[in-house]
Image (tube, rainbow, N blue to C red):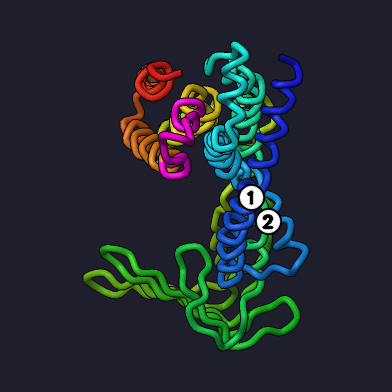
Amino acid sequence: MKHIHKYLLNNLSSTFFPIFITLYAITSIIYLVKIASLTSIITMNGVEMLYLYFLNVPTILFYSLPVSFFVASIINIAKISTEYELIVINSFGFSPLKVVNNFIPVSLLMTISLFIISFILIPKASYNKDIFINKKQQEARFNIKPSEYGQKFGPWYMYVEAKKNNEYLNIILYQNEKSKNTFISAKKAVLINNGNTLSLKLFNGTSSIITTNLKLVEFSKMTINTQLPNPKQISTLKDIINYWLHTNRKDNLLFYFFISLIPISSILLYISLGYYNPRYQKNRSTVYAIAFLIIYIVILQKLSKTEDLNSMIYFPLFWIILSYIIYIIRVKKYF
């Protein structure tokens, strides 16, 4: 039994890693394109882009691992069936259920790893990514260029004629609201960082407010503040729980939960879809694996949108029962 266990796991690893590496590479390319697109908003060098990529690694792993494991497990069983080795193992008294029991420890380990990645590592990486992007956007706000249109300071559009040292000369600000338009012009301005707040101090200018009439105000000094986003830090277990119990994240909570359960909840499907007699049946394991994976994802997407936490119990039970029914029809009836 020990030798069979080792043999089955060695075959699984030889099937899993090529699929995982390929899928990981494809997913990485997608995220690298997304990171590259951020350069239109913020300025990054190669090291910073690499840092941002590493912050996306937990998410890449989360999508790559369960899909690779699910497909590899079914293909692995089919591969052993093609070589008549499962039939030989079965002839020594090892039923299909005893064979699939060998995959329980590694499937459970995979599910636990996915729970750690999805519920701990992804939120922490997301926090660090928000901090990094906010910092770069803050730097971009300090990089106001003279004679360039379309630059913004909070809700204000701004135009600067010239810059001398840390002072902006001949600055114009414009804000469009529902019932009024506001124009501000000043001869000089200074941008100050106060931590989570950026302050624009204007000197010697006028403010024009246009509603049903025109109001003109002259000033010697005016300060406009804009609040910088401040993501909630995630450092304790309580922070993680609060992060996931937030109303806007309940759909993600369900999605991550169900994806993490794929390795262990689908364990009967590995033998049900991969086990076949090569003399009388055709190998359709890859088609079956992709089809059931699509069915699983479509169902969980619909459940995630309902934000019904009771489905965290009902759907895994439904999937296990469905897997057992398929096992009875396709495997137990013949082997």
The quarter of the image holding the N terminus is top right
Residue 101, x across and y down, in percent? 60, 16
Query: Taking the image as drawn, is residue 238 in sight?
Result: no
Residue range in magenta is 270-287
Asked if the residues shown at circle 2 and circle 1 are in contact, with their CB atoms under 8 angstroms apart, the answer is yes
Q: Relative to 64, say whether 93 is above or below.
A: above
Q: Is residue 278 magenta?
A: yes
Task: Residue 23: give x, y in percent of width and height.
Answer: 59, 51
Alpha-carbon distance for marks 2 and 1? 7 Å
Q: Residues within 10 Å of mark 2 (few under 14, many from 20)?
A: many
Foreground: 148 or 191?
148
Q: Where is residue 14 drawn, in percent x and y?
A: 69, 41
Residue 109 visible to the viewer: yes
**Residue holding disc 1:** 56
Find disc 2 in the rendering and name its residue: 52
Which label belongs to residue 243?
none
- The amino acid type of the residue labelled 2 equals Leu
x 32%, y 36%: residue: 302
